[in-house]
Image (spheres, grey):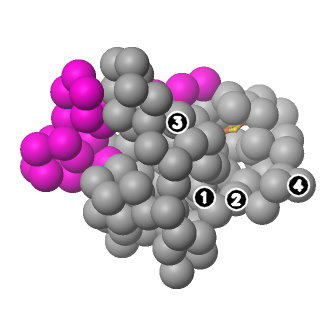
Amino acid sequence: MTSSAPAAAPDSYYERHIFFCLNQRGNGEASCADHPAQAGFDRCKQQVKAAGLSGPGRVRVNKAGCLDRCAGGPVAVVYPEAVWYTFVDMDDIDEIVDSHLKNGQVVERLVLPPDVGR
Ligand code: FES
């Protein structure tokens, strides 16, 4: 299921910016790196580029350190809408790219619940 996301601010350098946590925490604590975080990041970069979405005024895909929502890992967040996602496999990444990054439609089924923290 999808819903519309608000449009980016007109002076935003990127229309949308997605950050993937790739962090590995110590002491056996929940970490995004325990899941396919790197694979998701790589897939997203590949799909954004293949779709011709990358570059100024369009979409940027970046790595991030811990975003402090580790229990929901792997996590990614899309700005300017500040929509947080969790994902399981590369089909989920493809859906985020096609639906949200390309068309501005939030992928509701992958949205991280608001109470998920560290
Ligand atoms: S390890 Fe990914 S949010 Fe903390």
- In the drawing, what numbered circle is on residue 86? 1
Q: CA distance from mark 4 to mark 3?
A: 19 Å
Q: Is residue 108 left or right of residue 30?
A: left
Q: CA distance from mark 3 to mark 1?
A: 15 Å
* Residue located farthest toward the right when viewing the structure as drawn: 115
Q: Depth check: 90 or 94 in front?
A: 94
Q: Which residues are magenta?
A: 43-65
Question: Are the two marked residues, 2 and 1, in contact with CB atoms closer than 8 angstroms?
Answer: yes
Q: Which residue is disc 2 drawn over?
A: 112
* Residue located farthest toward the bottom when viewing the structure as drawn: 1
Q: Is mark 4 within 8 Å of ligand 1?
A: no
* Residue located farthest toward the front when viewing the structure as drawn: 10
Picture coordinates of residue 11, whole percent (x, y): 39, 19
Q: Which residue is disc 4 drawn over?
A: 115
Q: Is residue 88 visible?
A: no
Q: Depth check: 32 or 64 in front?
A: 64
Q: Please, what is the three-letter code of the amino acid marked with disc 1?
A: Thr
Q: Say above or below: 90 vs 115.
A: below
Badge 3 crowding class, 10 Å Cα cut-off, few under 14, some 14 to 19, many 20 or more, is some
Picture coordinates of residue 4, whole percent (x, y): 50, 63
Badge 1 crowding class, 10 Å Cα cut-off, few under 14, some 14 to 19, many 20 or more, is many
Q: Is mark 1 within 8 Å of ligand 1?
A: no
* Disc 2, SS: loop
**Ligand 1 is in which quadrant of the figure?**
top right
